Image (cartoon, helix red, strand yellow):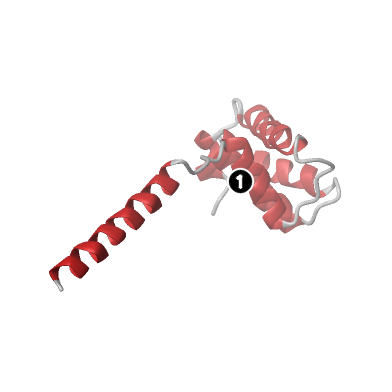
Amino acid sequence: MIRHRRTVAAVMAAAGFAMIGGVATAHAETRDEYFTNALVTMGIPMASNDEAPALGKKVCEMLTTGLTGNPNPVPAVRGVISTLASNGITKQQAVSLTQLSAASYCPQFARLTGR
């Protein structure tokens, strides 16, 4: 009986180490991969996954330009959303894209884009 318990304990320990080892070697997602995967999940159409990070960074450039020297962020954020919505995505997708871009690439603006 004692020998059986030791065998079970040894098997359980080996399984635990195997699980930990598998978790340790998991692939960490880069910021660009996270952003691209989030766009796909939101259903925002992209010609290729390679252009998604460039789009997110462009949104940040637009926010930076619109907010420079402007004490009221609302018109700048609305301008970015309007520009995105006029390029073939819905207004809600444009809002989500703006929020995701700010959270991913320009977190200093994340609080200005809402939740």
Which is more toward the observer, 93 or 27? Answer: 27
Q: Nearer the viewer, residue 6 or 115?
A: 6
Kindly give the residue lying farthest to the bottom in the view shown: 1
Query: Where does residue 31 sit, x and y in percent of width and height?
Result: 57, 37
- Residue 49 visible in the current orientation: yes
Q: Position of residue 23 (x, y in %)?
A: 43, 48
Please tell me which residue is depicted at 54% across the width and 54% down the height of the picture. 115
| Nearest the eye: 94 or 44 | 44
Residue in the picture at 79% in, 56% down: 90
| Residue at numbered disc 1 | 100
Which secondary structure lies at badge 1? Answer: helix
x and y percent of residue 85 in the render? 80, 49
Q: Quadrant of the N terminus?
A: bottom left
The answer to whether residue 74 shows anywhere in this view is no
The three-letter amino acid code for the residue at tag 1 is Leu
Seen in the picture, residue 77 relative to 60 is either above or below; the reply is below
